[in-house]
Each structure stands twice: as structure tokens, then as C-alpha cells.
Image: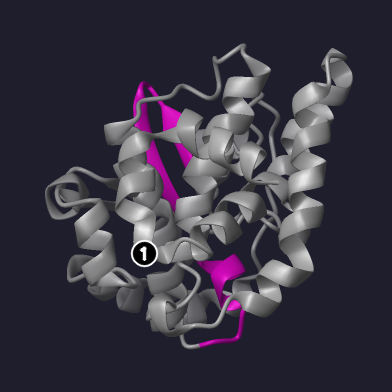
């Protein structure tokens, strides 16, 4: 795992070069500059958090490791080549994400944003890094250039699959012991309805709006991610076969199931 803490170190040394890092022109994916200057009062917390995060990542074990390893048997090998940037300066809600630069993917973890959770940083990092590592593993098995993909329905299809697995496996430890029934009852059907409506949309501006809402905004309103997560939660015994069948088959089954 390649961990780049240069942004943090520049911030801790009262530098300003980090403010021009390519990351802050890539958050939205459209070269728009986004930067939220972190307070100097946070320097002590950020310094100690950086050290903890580096230690955690060097010996990282994901949530639900047995299930994770069954779905992604080569995850340890893939993680050796993962590029991680520890950052400050990302505005809310950009706490953890993957961004591409010079044809390489980078997992970004903003330590100020992660400290906002006021939880044990070990658990916060484990949760978020499990999520982002799943994206890396899925992309290795199902390559997809979402930034340059022009087929609207294929993007939605991939989001349901990719975000579904990522949100489910990073939801909490021991998901097989968790009762998802109430969450499914409350959120699944209405999310599927939104997905079906989105899939029929043909107007470009509305398609862009649906894609933004499919995996952003308040948690339970991310309809594509929630459909994927809860469909998988309702089929925990079949995760391997669903994964092997791929994004298209998973979406077909969701639509036919209703």
C-alpha cells in the first residue's frame, strides 16, 4: 500500500503548497476547485490521527473479512498497489472517495472530515477503507470508466452493483448476524421505485440529476446505493453467485423481483 501524507505534512508545517494539490480540482470530477481551509487549532489532533491511520492501514483487515475474502480472494494482493492520500481541506461531505489522476486511482481519506464523526478513529478508518477497497476490488473484476461512460443506464446499473456491495460489507462488522428486515421494509421498495423511474428518464439534464442523487446526498436517499445494499442484504446467502453474475444480471433480478 502506497500512503502519501504530503498534504498533511505541509499543513502541519504551516505550508500552503498543499492547497494547490490536484485533489482539490478533482473532488467533483469537473476541474472545479473545492477547498475548505482547515483550522490550525486542529494540528495536534491531525498529527496524532495521521500516525494512527498509517498504523491501521499498514496492517489493515476489512470488515467481514471472511465474506470479503470469499468475494475478493485477491484483495491482499490488490491492496499492495493501492494508492492512498491522507488529506485535509476537503469540504463536507467529502470524507472518503476514490479519484483518478494521471490514469491512477487514489483512495482519499480526509482526516478533518473523519474526525467529525467523533468516534473511535480505528473503527471509522476500518469502515471507510473497507468501503473504498471494495471499489478497487470490483473495478479489478469489472472494469468500468464511469467518468467517460456515456450510457446512462449502464452507469446506474454499475452504481447499484458497485455501491451496493461497498455499502453492505462496510455497514458494520458481522453483517450476517444483523437483522436487516426493518431497514428493508422502510427503505427498499421506495428506493426501487425511484430507480425504475430514473431508468426510464431520457432527458439529459434530468439524467444528470438522477445520477447525482443515485449516490449522493443524505444516506437513505442515495437510491441506487440503497437498492443495491438492501437487495444484497436480503440475499446474504447468495452474495457469491450474485457477484459472479455481474452488474447487469443483478439489476435485472431487482427489476423482475418487484
- The structure residue drawn at horizontal position 36% and vertical position 36%, both measured from the top left corner, is 245
Q: Nearer the viewer, residue 206 or 198?
A: 198
Residue numbers of the magenta segment: 98-119
The reply to whether the magenta stretch includes residue 68 is no
The residue to which callout 1 is attached is: 237
The reply to whether the magenta stretch includes residue 105 is yes
Horizontal relation, residue 211 to residue 159: left or right = right
- The structure residue drawn at horizontal position 51% and vertical position 67%, both measured from the top left corner, is 111
Q: Nearer the viewer, residue 217 or 240?
A: 240
- The structure residue drawn at horizontal position 37% and vertical position 51%, both measured from the top left corner, is 134
- The structure residue drawn at horizontal position 50% and vertical position 57%, both measured from the top left corner, is 232
Horizontal relation, residue 73 to residue 31: left or right = left
Q: Identify whether 47 is placed above or below 223.
A: below
- Estimate the x, y position of residue 221 in percent, counting from the top left: 78, 55
- Estimate the x, y position of residue 33 in percent, counting from the top left: 69, 34
Q: Identify whether 252 is placed above or below 221.
A: above
- Estimate the x, y position of residue 114 in percent, counting from the top left: 55, 71
Q: Would you call the spot at circle 1 few (<14 residues within 10 Å), some (14-19), or many (20 or more)?
A: few
Task: Name the element at disc 1.
Answer: helix
Amino acid at each position: 500500500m502506497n500512503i502519501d501524507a504530503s498534504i498533511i505534512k505541509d499543513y502541519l508545517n504551516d505550508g500552503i503548497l498543499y492547497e494547490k494539490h490536484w485533489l482539490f480540482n478533482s473532488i467533483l470530477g469537473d476541474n472545479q476547485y473545492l477547498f475548505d481551509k482547515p483550522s490550525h487549532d486542529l494540528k495536534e489532533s491531525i498529527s496524532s490521527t495521521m500516525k494512527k491511520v498509517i498504523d491501521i492501514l499498514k496492517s489493515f483487515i476489512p470488515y467481514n473479512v471472511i465474506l470479503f475474502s470469499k468475494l475478493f480472494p485477491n484483495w491482499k494482493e490488490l491492496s499492495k498497489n493501492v494508492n492512498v492520500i491522507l488529506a485535509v481541506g476537503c469540504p463536507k461531505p467529502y470524507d472518503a472517495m476514490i479519484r483518478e489522476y494521471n490514469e491512477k486511482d487514489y483512495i482519499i481519506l480526509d482526516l478533518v472530515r473523519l474526525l467529525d464523526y467523533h468516534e473511535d478513529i480505528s473503527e471509522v478508518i476500518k469502515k471507510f477503507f473497507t468501503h473504498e477497497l471494495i471499489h478497487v476490488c470490483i473495478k479489478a473484476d469489472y472494469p468500468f470508466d464511469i467518468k467517460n461512460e456515456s450510457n446512462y443506464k449502464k452507469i446506474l446499473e454499475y452504481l447499484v452493483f458497485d455501491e451496493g456491495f461497498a455499502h453492505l460489507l462496510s455497514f458494520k462488522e458481522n453483517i450476517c448476524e444483523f437483522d436487516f428486515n426493518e431497514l428493508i421494509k422502510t427503505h427498499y421498495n421506495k428506493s426501487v421505485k425511484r430507480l425504475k423511474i430514473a431508468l426510464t428518464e431520457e432527458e439529459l439534464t434530468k439524467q444528470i440529476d438522477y445520477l447525482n442523487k443515485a449516490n449522493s446526498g443524505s444516506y437513505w436517499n442515495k437510491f441506487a446505493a440503497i437498492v443495491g445494499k438492501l437487495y444484497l442484504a436480503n440475499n446474504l446467502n447468495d452474495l457469491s453467485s450474485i457477484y459472479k453474475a455481474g452488474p447487469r444480471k443483478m439489476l435485472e433480478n431487482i427489476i423482475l423481483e418487484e
